[in-house]
């Protein structure tokens, strides 16, 4: 208010309006899930010296994200206070990219977790039945090139439970060969690969599903037979985001419904009333027979019961899932490639007595460890520790010796 020398009001220069409380977001993130996921990932990263990692937990019946941890990260308070140029440049130059949400804004080769696609496609397209036996040797040959299994002896005659449970590369080379690259790509897209999931977070990337059309457009050449083999085991051109991969396994766990992953549950007004609820959103109902998905769920259980995941089967709860060892980068002096570790697991609603014949799971968990290079699959150990914390399992089943650096790069 402006006044003259006598104190009389001459004009109002500015009207101050009292601030009104705004709306609030209520998230799907569960504090206990988030704390357990963070604790498990931090434990492994410190134990091994891993520089990047992700843990995600989802409810497959709704698409709700109950925990999402991406490390390294940064302190939001630095930006709230006004970050200095030097501090911001340090974040930008950090090779482990703390400003990036690695769960949605970065993609990586999925390794053997992607065998879900070839297995599903081979069954759905009737290239095999659940009881078909396929001879798995230590390698397959195309022309003069040998494509090796991680197990140089092979596994002999394998059905889908044996092939998926032991993660036989030569089994899935053959499944990819039976399907062909374009049909393999079709089944990958049924699981949501190659497109953003639509999660309500910024900067999501699409990943890559290789097909003949994709390679012609990107590189001006067709897919070669060996590249089809590699695509069948999650190598070559295959890249996925962690949120895509866990979302694919949620569709497996729930019987074929691909949901849009959801972080926001509702918007709440200052009076406590819900302004806008966010209901589960279905992206698609997969064109896969329920019987095929039941076979693949039980094949995922075989990964655990055949002890491909070491002692995960000894936990007092039932777990099914798939590990992955994804090679990338340049070979060392011994010809070995560095690798990432993955594990995606799910638990039936009745975690102690439930059956994987039914799609009852209400918990799927994924762990990703960048450039892990450990003797065992560190992602499996992360998930195991998370499950111990979540289900309050008193006995410690972790195997620290598996987290030592070593030449385990060929395991899957």
Image (cartoon, helix red, strand yellow):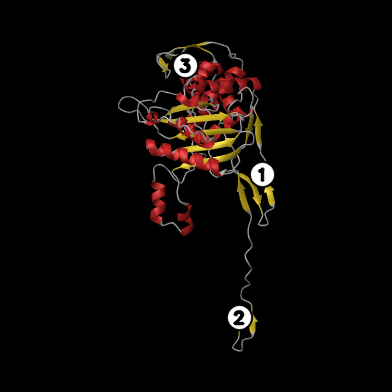
Quadrant in the rendering for residue 354: top right
Question: In the rendered view of the protein, which quadrant contains the N terminus?
Answer: bottom right
- At x 48%, y 52%, the residue is 76
Residue 97's quadrant in the figure? top left
Disc 1 is placed on an element classified as loop
Element type at mark 3: helix
Upstream in the sequence, badge 3 or badge 2? 2
Residue 278 rendering spot, x and y as whole percentages:
66, 44
- Residue 280 image-quadrant placement: top right
The picture places residue 141, in percent across and down from the top left corner, at 43, 13
Q: Which of marks 1 and 3 is nearer the N terminus?
A: 3
* Label 3 Cα crowd, 10 Å radius (few <14 / some 14-19 / many 20+): many
Q: Pointer 3: what residue?
A: 170
- The residue tagged 2 is 2
Please provide percent x and percent y for residue 350: 61, 29
Q: Nearer the viewer, mark 2 or mark 1?
A: 1
Q: What x and y, as percent, mark residue 61?
A: 64, 34
Give the alpha-carbon distance from disc 2 to disc 1, as whole Å: 49 Å
Q: What element carries label 2?
A: strand
- Nearer the observer: mark 1 or 3; the answer is 1
Q: Can residue 221 be seen in this view?
A: no
Dot 1 corresponds to which residue? 278
For label 2, the crowd category at 10 Å Cα-Cα, with few meaning under 14, some 14 to 19 and many 20 or more, is few
Say which mark, if any, is on residue 394: none
Considering only vertical position in the picture, is 75 above or below 141? below
3D distance between C-alphas at marks 1 and 3: 44 Å
Q: Which residue lies most toward the left here?
A: 333
Q: In which quarter of the image is the C terminus?
A: top left
Looking at the picture, tell me which residue is in the foreground, 267 or 3.
Answer: 267
């Amino acid at each position: 208010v402006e006044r003259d020398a006598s104190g009389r009001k001459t004009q109002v220069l500015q009207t101050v309006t009292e601030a009104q409380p705004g709306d609030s977001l209520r998230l799907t993130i569960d504090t206990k899930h988030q704390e357990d996921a963070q604790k498990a990932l931090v434990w492994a990263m410190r134990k091994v010296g891993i520089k990047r990692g992700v843990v995600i937990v989802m409810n497959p019946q709704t698409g709700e994200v109950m925990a999402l941890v991406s490390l390294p990260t940064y302190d939001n308070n630095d930006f709230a206070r006004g970050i200095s140029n030097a501090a911001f440049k340090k974040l930008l130059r950090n090779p482990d990219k703390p400003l990036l949400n690695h769960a949605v804004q970065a993609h990586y080769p999925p390794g053997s977790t992607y065998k879900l696609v070839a297995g599903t496609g081979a069954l759905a397209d009737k290239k095999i039945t659940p009881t078909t036996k396929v001879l798995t040797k230590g390698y397959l040959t195309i022309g003069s090139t040998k494509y090796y299994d991680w197990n140089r002896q092979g596994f002999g005659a394998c059905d889908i439970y044996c092939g998926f449970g032991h993660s036989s590369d030569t089994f899935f080379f053959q499944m990819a060969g039976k399907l062909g690259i374009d049909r393999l790509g079709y089944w990958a897209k049924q699981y949501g690969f190659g497109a953003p999931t639509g999660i309500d977070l910024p900067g999501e990337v699409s990943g890559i599903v290789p097909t003949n059309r994709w390679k012609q457009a990107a590189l001006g050449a067709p897919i070669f037979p060996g590249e089809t083999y590699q695509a069948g085991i999650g190598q070559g051109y295959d890249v996925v985001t962690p949120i895509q991969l866990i979302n694919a396994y949620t569709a497996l766990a729930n019987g074929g419904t691909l949901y849009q992953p959801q972080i926001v549950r509702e918007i709440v007004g200052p009076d406590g009333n819900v302004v806008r609820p966010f209901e589960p959103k279905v992206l698609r109902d997969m064109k896969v027979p329920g019987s095929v998905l039941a076979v693949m769920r039980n094949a995922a259980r075989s990964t655990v019961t055949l002890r491909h995941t070491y002692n995960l089967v000894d936990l007092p709860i039932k777990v099914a899932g798939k590990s992955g060892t994804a090679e990338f980068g340049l070979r060392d002096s011994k010809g070995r490639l560095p690798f990432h570790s993955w594990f995606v697991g799910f638990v039936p609603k009745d975690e102690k007595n439930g059956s994987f014949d039914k799609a009852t799971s209400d918990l799927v968990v994924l762990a990703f460890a960048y450039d892990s290079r450990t003797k065992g699959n560190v992602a499996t150990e992360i998930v195991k520790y998370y499950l111990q914390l979540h289900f309050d399992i008193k006995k410690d089943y972790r195997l620290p010796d598996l987290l030592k650096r070593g030449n385990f790069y060929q395991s899957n």
